[in-house]
Image: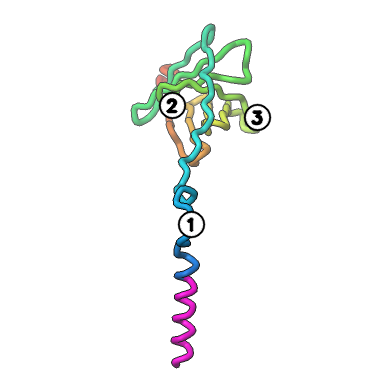
Amino acid sequence: MMSILKLFTACAMACAIAVAPSAHANPKKAAAKPAAAAPAEPEPSVTEHKATEYACELGNKITIYTNAEDSNSIALRWKNRLHRLTREATTTGAQRFENKLAGLIWIGIPAKGMLLDSKVNRQLANECKTSEQALGL
């Protein structure tokens, strides 16, 4: 019994020594560095773009700007910030646009649209509808 107690005590002391900071450690090096801010993207120009307003659940609003000469990208206004999203191919016929740096994904189907955050895997806005979609037109 005594040898098990000694073994347990020795293990506990070894763990405490391994976890304890060294007396010679440099406190400046030990201080946590702040996370680097994500590089900011310049907001896209939306001059000569068609704006489409979406009203979403929970009072959220989204504006999508399209350009007839560029069907491979859109500009999306979310929370007073304008983001450029590029088209991603789908097999379902849904319109899917993504900005990998911002983590935004817009999915549009004939009945509604939704905005997703791919960085935290959650919906930002759902049931987004134009006035025509809301009327069922």
Q: Which residue is mark 2?
A: 128
The residue that label 3 is drawn on is 89
Question: From this viewpoint, is residue 60 visible?
Answer: yes
> At label 2, which amino acid type do we have?
Cys
In the displayed structure, 135 sits above or below 58; it is: above
Q: Give SS at disc 2.
A: strand
- Where does residue 94 sit, x and y in percent of width and height? 58, 28
Q: Nearer the viewer, mark 2 or mark 1?
A: 1
Asked whether, in this view, residue 126 is left or right of residue 38, the answer is: left
Residue 89, picture quadrant: top right
Give the magenta range.
1-15
Q: Please tell me which residue is depicted at 63% across the width and 10% down the height of the picture.
A: 69
Q: Where does residue 96 sit, x and y in percent of width and height? A: 58, 28
Give the prevailing secondary structure in the magenta stretch.
helix
Residue assigned mark 1: 25
Q: Residues within 10 Å of mark 2 (few under 14, many from 20)?
A: many
Q: Earlier in the sequence, mark 3 or mark 2?
A: 3
